[in-house]
Image (spheres, grey):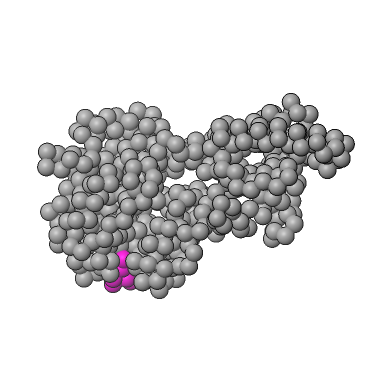
């Protein structure tokens, strides 16, 4: 069930917000250029991030004016007006002081709020934010004016374009899974109109928080990825240096997103900063897609062939599987007899890899069964474990020879990828609670 959406009044505008978690501390999350409170729960990676975030705090998320579920006035809001949305939401909930966390453009809002309302701050956190977004002679980080103008053209030309999503707009990176890019495109179309985004980005181009950063007195944590295509890491480092006593943390990756496989590490750092306590072994959990494979009727085939011929067949089978794993960027994590377990950073790649393997092994006169699932996995050295892995194994055990069977979670994640599915009905998976809708990927 989605959390209840409520509304706070900021002047004559209603600001939509949702509250999840029960404390012991409050974190108000100021979003980037656009957001959509309800659709956050329909993209599994985003939903997992906010679910995890809500475990150690009361998390307050809102759609700023002009975006998502909030009022969309004709006149676009200034940075000061957007910043006042934070105050309005805190007042509506009855929060006197909070940890304010700004992501991307929301980082500019959070810095402005911290400097304007020091008495209402417990701590300030930013992700992927810098003092300016356009470079100047005295500020070498950010887009050039020509690059910025080109980004504005992207907004009005086929919104939201691949270039905007993967590059200077959303910055998910060009290596992001195509199905995830398509999900983000749907999210952005619902979150804001092209004209609204154009107006906000124009205003963002004029932002310069350098004059107010030294006035921030709250404990501050500034976070950024090394290869962020939206916020240059040196720009974020410079912003941290201008805030008295601020800490700076750098994370690997070429994306603007904090919702990647290392989200547990990031959330653990946030939890430690706002509560003083760090969860145990949080860095050993990741979100991954698992692929299980085995040879159909392998026992009968091994018995018929004899040891030597079976071993030769297995070696040829291993060669085909590993070739396709390399092609689709899968990581082999466990092999036992004819069984393979591999992990992927995107479910569409896992499905396409399984289909390619199924086709490739036919030259050997064999068929494989494949099962694909996406969920939270526990890292155990070079291997993975956890309930998601068990689910993947059970899905494979329900697959017919030469078929690729996936969970409903995977089917939803790859919507828009072009992969077609056949509904295989509802199944009970041994040792796994509940009933599971399974689907066969079509080659």
Q: Is residue 196 left or right of residue 2?
A: left
Residue 142 x, y percent position in the rendering: 23, 40
Magenta stretch contains residue 95: yes
Q: In which quarter of the image is residue 360?
A: top right
In the picture, measured across the screen, residue 16 lies left or right of residue 3, that is: left
On the question of residue 376 being in view, the answer is no
Q: Position of residue 404 (x, y in %)?
A: 69, 38
Whether residue 148 sits left or right of residue 290 in the image: it is: left
Image quarter hosting the C terminus: top right
Residue at point 45%, 64% (across, down): 54
Query: Residue at point 49% right, 64% down?
Result: 281
Total numbered badges shown on the rendered structure: 0
Q: In the displayed image of the protein, which residue is found farthest to the right?
A: 304
Residue farthest to the front?
A: 308
| Frontmost residue, 211 versus 65 | 211
Residue sitting at 20 percent across and 34 percent down? 144
Q: What stretch is highlighted in magenta?
A: 91-99
| Residue 167 falls in image quadrant | top left
Quarter that holds the N terminus: bottom right
> Is residue 68 inside the magenta stretch?
no
Viewer-proximal residue among 349 and 147: 349
Residue at 34% x, 68% y: name it: 274
Q: From this viewpoint, is residue 386 visible?
A: yes
Answer with left or right where residue 140 lies relative to residue 297.
left
Question: Residue 63's spot in the image, x, y percent?
Answer: 36, 53
In this view, 119 is above or below 439? below
């Amino acid at each position: 069930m989605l959390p209840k959406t409520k509304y706070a009044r900021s002047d004559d505008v209603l600001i939509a917000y949702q509250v999840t978690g029960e404390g012991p501390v409050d974190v108000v999350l100021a979003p980037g250029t656009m957001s959509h409170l309800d659709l956050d729960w329909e993209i599994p990676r985003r939903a997992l991030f906010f679910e995890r975030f809500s475990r150690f705090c009361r998390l307050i998320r809102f759609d700023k004016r002009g975006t998502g579920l909030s009022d969309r006035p004709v006149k676009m809001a200034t940075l000061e007006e957007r910043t006042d949305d934070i105050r309005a939401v805190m007042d509506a909930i009855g929060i006197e002081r909070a940890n304010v966390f700004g992501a991307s453009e929301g980082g500019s809002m959070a810095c402005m709020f911290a400097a304007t309302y020091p008495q209402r701050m417990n701590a300030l956190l930013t992700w992927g934010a810098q003092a300016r977004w356009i470079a100047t002679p005295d500020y070498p980080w950010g887009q050039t004016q020509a690059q910025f103008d080109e980004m504005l053209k992207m907004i009005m030309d086929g919104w939201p374009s691949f270039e905007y999503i993967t590059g200077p707009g959303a910055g998910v990176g060009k290596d992001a899974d195509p199905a995830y890019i398509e999900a983000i495109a749907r999210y952005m179309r619902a979150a804001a109109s092209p004209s609204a985004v154009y107006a906000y980005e124009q205003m963002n181009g004029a932002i310069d928080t350098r004059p107010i950063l030294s006035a921030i007195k709250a404990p501050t944590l500034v976070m950024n990825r090394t290869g962020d295509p939206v916020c240059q890491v040196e720009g974020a480092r410079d912003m941290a240096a201008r805030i008295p006593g601020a800490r700076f943390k750098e994370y690997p990756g070429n994306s603007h997103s904090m919702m990647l496989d290392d989200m547990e590490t990031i959330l653990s750092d946030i939890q430690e900063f706002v509560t003083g306590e760090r969860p145990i072994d949080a860095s050993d959990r990741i979100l991954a897609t698992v692929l299980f494979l085995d040879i159909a009727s392998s026992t009968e085939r091994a018995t018929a062939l004899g040891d030597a011929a079976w071993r030769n067949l297995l070696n040829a089978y291993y060669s085909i599987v590993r070739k396709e794993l390399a092609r689709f960027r899968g990581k082999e994590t466990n092999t036992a007899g004819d069984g393979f377990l591999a992990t992927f950073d995107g479910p569409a790649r896992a499905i396409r890899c399984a289909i390619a393997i199924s086709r490739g092994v036919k030259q050997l006169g064999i068929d494989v069964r494949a099962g694909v699932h996406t969920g939270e996995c526990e890292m155990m050295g070079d291997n993975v474990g956890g309930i998601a892995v068990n689910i993947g194994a059970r899905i494979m055990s329900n697959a017919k020879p030469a078929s690729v069977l996936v969970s409903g979670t995977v089917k939803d994640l790859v919507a828009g990828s072009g992969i077609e599915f056949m509904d295989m009905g509802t199944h009970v998976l041994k040792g796994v609670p509940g009933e599971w809708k399974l689907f066969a990927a079509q080659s």
